[in-house]
Amino acid sequence: MHVEQLAGKTLCFAGSGGLDSMTIVSWLKAHGVKVECVTADFGQPDESSLDAVRERMLAAGASAVHIVDLRHNLARAGLEVIKARAFHAGRYWNTTGVARHVLLKGMLETMRSLGLDIVSHGCTGRGNDQVRFQHITNLLEPGFTVYAPWRDPAFLRQFQGRKAMIEYCQAQGLPLKASAEVIYSTDANLLGLTHEAGILESLETAASVVTPTMGVSVLEAAETPQEVTIGFDQGRPCAIDGQRLDALALLERANAIAGRHGIGMHVHLVEDRVIGIKSRGVYEAPGMELLGSCHEYLGQIVFDDSARRLFGHLSELVADHIYRGTWFDKTSAAAMAAIDELSSGMSGEITVRLYKGTLAFVAARGIAGALYNQDNASMEAVGSFSHADSEGYLQATGQSIKMAGLTGAINRLLYQRI
């Protein structure tokens, strides 16, 4: 869809109050398009006032700005990510990807109440978010239209990049939040921050150039270690240090605790965007890393080998669907249902020690579905499983291996290399 086709119509734009948002809204209004904005309250740690966002979007030409409180929704979604341990390759906790699902759900519901059916966004034609906006809208509201200015030749002819947009906004007298001196881009919500672009595009730029927002760097972390206990109910975090909390309060406290110890900061990842372009990002998600690491320790105690393998496969599938914007589809629903079943015994407490960016296991207590048995695992006593019981097992499993040796079916190349 091109801007000429939108003249005289009203669309709903996902506005953050940043440079791209203000440029696009002003440009659309200049082309005869009426714009209503939806801005999500995600507990953004880098935005002091959403009222300021409203004022910037209105100044840019929006006819209305609808601020939708989605903090609790995002927190609940974040705990689903923890339960599935659905981090993207390189330990990125999918904080932006899952937030897009929550945003579009809230935005589309708002649009239905307003009688609008054209979705618009400021995502570039080279990134993942344009894919997520398209996929999620197509799935939840297949009758709606998605208009992406960054894929409109008319917009691209006028705006080649950030410098052109800044000059445009300055010429229009718009109150920019950003300036040309911003050295990288940040997308923030209460689950974590994604930093990319600018100087981070160079692989000679260290991840430590990013100034943490949700905590501190390892060098600035607290001098005293801290032990923290995370309680789980069927795989979902539910308590910190014995106090049960709702999803939002739990994540806020986890962020505060892990953040002051430099946990989950400066996670560097060169990844493959959905459209095939490699990109470099630096991530911070202290609370998610704390909760996710405790969930991982819990899984070691509860899952047998086949359950661990299945969970790993399901986890990777869910993570990929979140990343690609298809978390609301049937395949994801089936995967999450299987994760629910596997998580039925994942209740109890995990205690860890945080210190200078490190997270170490301390104790596990009250694990309902624990398969670990100290007596059987002990090297000090026989317990209910005798050492001699392994004789029959090894006689049976060793037969095929012995035949391989007799027939010479061994890896001679590897044998020679070592």
Image: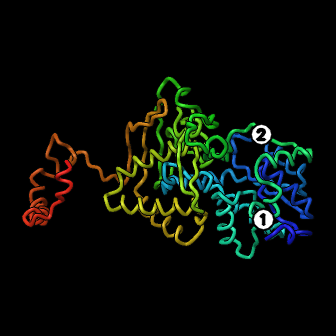
Q: Nearer the viewer, residue 184 or 324?
A: 184
Q: Position of residue 373 (x, y in %)?
A: 26, 49
Q: Residue at x 46, y 55 (%)?
A: 234
Q: Residue at x 78, y 61 (%)?
A: 149
The amino acid at mark 1 is Asp
Q: Position of residue 153 (x, y in %)?
A: 79, 64
Separation (CA) of disc 2 from disc 1 = 24 Å
Q: Position of residue 174 (x, y in %)?
A: 89, 45
**Residue hosting label 2:** 180
Tell me, yes or no, whether the two marked residues, 2 and 1, touch with CB atoms within 8 Å. Answer: no
Q: Quadrant of the N terminus?
A: bottom right
Q: Residues within 10 Å of mark 1 (few under 14, many from 20)?
A: some
Name above or below for residue 8 compared with residue 214: below
Q: Residue at x 50, y 42 (%)?
A: 290
The amino acid at mark 2 is Ala
Q: Is residue 83 visible?
A: no
**Residue hosting label 1:** 152
Q: Nearer the viewer, residue 33 or 240?
A: 33
Q: Residue at x 90, y 54 (%)?
A: 61
Q: Which mark is residue 269?
A: none
Q: Residues within 10 Å of mark 2 (few under 14, many from 20)?
A: few
Q: Position of residue 213 (x, y in %)?
A: 64, 36
Secondary structure at badge 2 equals loop
Q: Quadrant of residue 144?
A: bottom right
Q: Quadrant of residue 325?
A: bottom right
Q: Nearer the viewer, residue 235 or 87?
A: 87
Secondary structure at badge 1 equals loop
Q: Is residue 56 visible?
A: yes
Judged left or right of residue 207, residue 39 is: right
Q: Quadrant of residue 308?
A: bottom left
